[in-house]
Amino acid sequence: MAGSDVILLDFWPSMFGMRVRIALAEKGIKYEYREQDLQNKSALLLEMNPIHKKIPVLIHKGKAINESNIIVQYIDETWNDKSPLMPSDPYARAQARFWADYVDKKVYDASKKIWVFTGEEQEKGKKEFIEIMKVLEGQIGDKPYFMGESFGYADISLVTFYSWFYTCETLGNFSIEKECPKLIAWAKRCMQRESVSKSLPDSKKIYEFWNDMKSKLGHEHVPEVENFGSFHVWFSTG
């Protein structure tokens, strides 16, 4: 595999891939980006992630690292000479991992219910989503970032979902800012960082992508979350 020492296999709307892009940008790492067609997975993707067969995959010197939060930790530990993403204190590091894990286990599944369902099921998903956002907002509180004064690992785990907030709000007919103003203030603060603003696609472009996917899949298939075909597979990686 000739070329760059660092290669990222990714798909542009993936909130999980965005995490890796932010971490690489924070560290100033040059890399080769390879957009993946997840309806026709490349031989390289299947070779480098044979277990899950999903993006993102970071390839560093020919070796693959999978799962976005694991990749972000790997980037922080490997390029540790600038822009630390994890706190230096062991307890604070444990807390950062806890909140990143909370995001992984809660946010995607709740937001998916808003995208996929309508009616009563969507309302349940919306209520669940708002409750989760309020928990996260409580952790941020009046601090600039999750763990205090410095942008880092826990912030990266959540901020990429911000690009999908407009889609959630439009489909669910609600305002996240009205429900969680401090959370949105935090997200806007993160967006002032070049690493974030250049890694997150425009939110309306995400919404257009969703509508295009929904049209291709057909409205009759949308409620079938467990059988949601390629779209479900694209974003179910952590």
Image (cartoon, grey):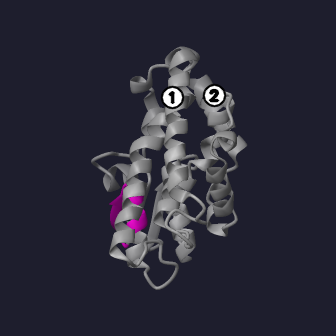
Q: Amino acid at mark 1?
A: Gly
Span colored in magenta: 61-73
CB of mark 1 within 8 Å of CB of mark 2?
yes
Query: According to the image, label 1 marks what residue?
Result: 125
Q: Residue 72 in the image: state x and y as whole percent.
A: 43, 65
Position of 175 relative to 125 (above/below): below
Q: Mark 1: which secondary structure?
A: helix
Q: Amino acid at mark 2?
A: Gly
Question: From this viewpoint, is residue 238 visible?
Answer: no
Q: Nearer the viewer, residue 172 or 163?
A: 172
Q: Mark 2: which secondary structure?
A: helix
Tell whether position 168 is magenta.
no
Query: According to the image, label 2 marks what residue?
Result: 172
Q: Residue 38 in the image: state x and y as whole percent.
A: 47, 41
Q: Residue 91 in the image: state x and y as whole percent.
A: 34, 70
Left or right? Give the position of 216 relative to 147: right
Neighbour tally class for label 1: few under 14, some 14-19, many 20 plus, Cα within 10 Å = many
